[in-house]
Amino acid sequence: MSESEKDFTTENYLEGIRNKKLLGSKCKNCGEQYVPVRKLCTKCNSANMEWVEMSGKGEIAAFTCITVGTPFFVEKGYDRNKPYCFSVIKLEEGPMISAQLIGVDESKPETISVGMPVKVTFIETDVKGDTRVDLGFEPA
């Protein structure tokens, strides 16, 4: 099944990330774009959607540095002495998406700013012998 024939599901969106592609959906009627994908355009209520690959470029809309994380991040080595950043990114195409922010000094949040240009990256983590690929962003 080709990418254009796949249903607009979270699983197919995550499959794109595992294949190191940031995919979204675009309304063929009004042009509105969504990441993660949606089956229905919330702007014009159309179900006439298509898959699109995003540029992966954008800017930080919001961020936070976290010192007490989820078990997954604690297992990856993050803690009070090694925080991680989570961000909301406004993509060039318009949609906003949340993801881990890497390649910054998490211990000095004053060096990170809203509006900072970023680009997509894919974070590979070994989880019990399997490689997990997650979406991330880093300074452009």
Image: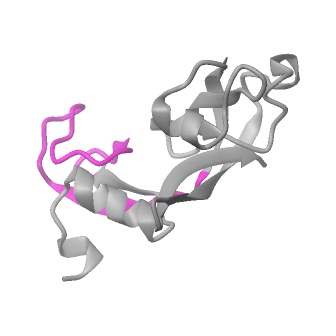
Q: In terms of depth relative to the viewer, which is nearer, 136 or 79?
A: 79
Residue 131 covered by magenta stretch: no
Determine if residue 48 is in view.
yes
Query: Residue 28: percent from the left, percent from the top?
Result: 25, 55
Where does the image place residue 89, in percent across and percent down from the top left? 58, 34
Quadrant of residue 43 within the rendered picture: top left
Magenta segment main secondary structure:
loop
Residue located 30% across and 62% down the image: 51
Vertical placement of 72 versus 130: above or below?
above
Q: How many marks?
A: 0
Q: Nearer the viewer, residue 121 or 47?
A: 121
Q: Residue at x 15, y 42 (%)?
A: 40
How was the colour assigned to the protein in this rendering? one colour
94, above or below 24, in the image: above
Which residue is nearer to you in this view: 137 or 30?
137
**Segment tinted magenta in the rendering:** 27-56
Q: Is residue 99 visible?
A: no
Left or right of 4? Residue 47 is: left
**Residue 39 image offset from top left, x and y in percent:** 16, 48
> Residue at left 47%, top 32%?
71
Q: Does the magenta segment cover residue 48?
A: yes
Q: Is residue 70 left or right of residue 118?
A: left
Which residue occupies 18% across, 35% down?
Answer: 44
Left or right, 2 with respect to 108, comes to: left
Vertical order, 9 against 35 (above or below): below
User: Image quarter for residue 6?
Assistant: bottom left
